[in-house]
Image (cartoon, grey):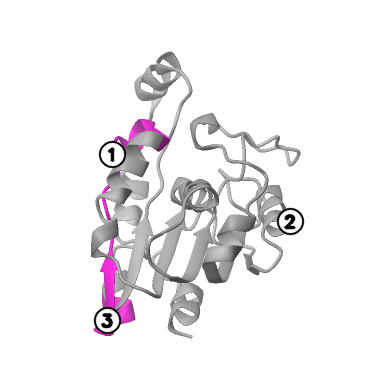
Amino acid sequence: MKKQVLVIHGGETFAFYDDYFFYLKNYKIDLEKIKAKSKGWKKHLQEDLGDEFEVIQPQMPSFRNAKYKEWKIWLEKYLSFLHDDIILIGHSLGGKFWAKYLSENSLPVKISQLHLVAAPFGNNDDTSGKTQNYDLIDFNFSQDLSKIEEQVKNIFLYHSEDDPLVPFIDLKKYTKALPNAEKVIFKDKGHFSVEKFSEILKNIKQ
């Protein structure tokens, strides 16, 4: 049986519709950024991992203005297809989604690994001088993440010091809440909109 890898992508989220509307009106299209995303590491994860793995990447609802309850409903449509020793990945808001979901719910299968990539922790009481344009309150969770460690054998936290969206201090918050997690720190991966991510491949295959 192939090892399953379930990936939850990122997105934007706003507490108020007016904020979302303002974001849409003022959003500037960056073709280079769009092209880079189309070649990103998640796009060819199945190819990179090989035939021993089955990569599942749901397209979560309304990713431009994500709502936790909607994402939860959508994820749970996939649960009956999963089997034991699944590997979970969450990038950006997808990582925060997994943190909230697994701290409040039990997956019906055993979880081998959880990979949180550039995951925001809270509403980013940012002390680093960066700005965070999104209100994450709909995805906020309790500070107690012990239920995650009860369910997951191996947890990996990936963060880059030059991430322009999620402050580096959020990694420290996850480290405190998940003391058994392994930290993987970079200096130049930004928000992980990169084509190659060999470190996560190595950890998945271990």
The residue carrying mark 1 is: 61
> In x, y percent, where is residue 133?
54, 30
29 to 58, vertically: above or below = above
> In x, y percent, where is residue 8?
37, 54
Residue at 57 percent across and 46 percent down: it is 120
- Quadrant occupied by the N terminus: bottom left
The residue carrying mark 2 is: 176
The residue carrying mark 3 is: 2
Identify the amino acid type marked 3: Lys
> In x, y percent, where is residue 62?
30, 35
Q: Earlier in the sequence, mark 3 or mark 2?
A: 3
Along the viewing direction, whichever of 189 and 74 lies nearer the viewer: 74
Report whether 176 appears left or right of 57.
right
* Alpha carbon distance from label 1 to label 2: 31 Å
* Alpha carbon distance from label 1 to label 3: 27 Å
Q: Which residues are magenta?
A: 47-68
Estimate how packed mark 1 is, as few (under 14), some (14 to 19) or many (20 or more) residues with alpha carbons within 10 Å: some
Along the viewing direction, whichever of 119 and 85 lies nearer the viewer: 85
Task: Please tell me whether mark 3 sits on a helix, a strand or a loop.
Answer: loop
Task: Please tell me whether mark 2 sits on a helix, a strand or a loop.
Answer: helix
Res 43 visible: yes
